[in-house]
């Protein structure tokens, strides 16, 4: 569900949108906030009585190791650890995707990390599973 969008007439630096992914039991939701040219961020809120409270998530990054760059230079960060909530699973865990991309005259390299976040009884979040895939493009 989309919950907010910016007015495009305000200019490029003010463009944003927010999407909510409600857990099927309605006891939590994930918010993906995207700010144009600055990437996106995921926040998770859990029900606390009649309101929701934000819970702290572990650091969600998709590092690009030097060996993946193959000795080439990629001086421009095209996307820096942009996060997006993908889906809630039946067990109450959340699938989040993190994308990191660098580029330059020699093409681009992308790291896409998929993380499954689990939440314990005290609503503390932890990474249950993590996989990272790398891709590259020539100029």
Image: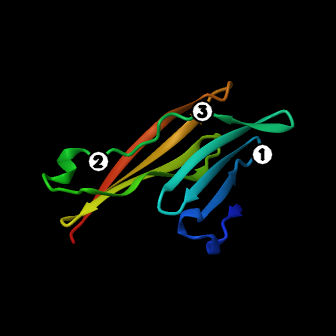
- In the image, residue 37 sits, relative to residue 47, either above or below, namely below
| Residue drawn where x is 64% and y is 50% of the image | 31
Residue 116 horizontal/vertical position (percent)? 51, 42
Q: Which residue is mark 3?
A: 56
- In the image, residue 111 sits, relative to residue 119, either above or below, namely below
Q: Is residue 108 visible?
A: no
Around disc 2, counting alpha carbons within 10 Å, would you say few (fewer than 14), some (14 to 19), or many (20 or more)? Answer: some
Q: Nearer the viewer, mark 2 or mark 1?
A: 2
Around disc 1, counting alpha carbons within 10 Å, would you say few (fewer than 14), some (14 to 19), or many (20 or more)? Answer: few
Q: Which residue is mark 1?
A: 26
Q: Which residue is mark 2?
A: 64
Along the viewing direction, whichever of 125 and 10 lies nearer the viewer: 10
Residue 131 occupies which quadrant of the picture?
top left
57 relative position to 70: left or right: right
Question: Which secondary structure, mark 2?
Answer: loop
- Disc with the residue nearer the chain's start (2 vs 1): 1
Disc 2/disc 3 C-alpha distance (Å): 24 Å
Asked if labels 1 and 2 touch by Cβ distance under 8 angstroms, the answer is no
Furthest-right residue in this view? 50
Question: Which secondary structure, mark 3?
Answer: loop
Residue 45 horizontal/vertical position (percent)? 69, 40
Along the viewing direction, whichever of 130 and 101 lies nearer the viewer: 101
- Disc with the residue nearer the chain's start (2 vs 3): 3
Residue 17 occupies which quadrant of the picture?
bottom right
Disc 1/disc 3 C-alpha distance (Å): 19 Å
Question: Which secondary structure, mark 1?
Answer: loop
Which quadrant holds the N terminus? bottom right
Residue 134 occupies which quadrant of the picture?
bottom left
Which quadrant holds the C terminus? bottom left
């Amino acid at each position: 569900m989309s919950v907010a969008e910016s007015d495009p007439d305000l200019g490029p630096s003010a463009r944003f949108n927010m999407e909510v992914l409600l857990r099927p039991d309605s006891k939590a939701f994930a918010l993906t906030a995207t700010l144009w040219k600055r990437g996106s961020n995921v926040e998770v809120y859990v029900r606390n009585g009649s309101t929701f409270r934000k819970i702290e998530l572990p650091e969600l990054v998709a590092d690009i190791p030097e060996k993946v760059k193959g000795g080439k230079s990629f001086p421009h960060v095209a996307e820096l650890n942009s996060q997006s909530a993908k889906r809630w699973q039946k067990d109450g865990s959340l699938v989040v995707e993190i994308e990191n991309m660098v580029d330059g005259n020699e093409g681009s390299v992308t790291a896409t990390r998929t993380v499954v976040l689990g939440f314990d009884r005290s609503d503390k979040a932890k990474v249950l599973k993590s996989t990272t895939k790398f891709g590259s493009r020539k100029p």
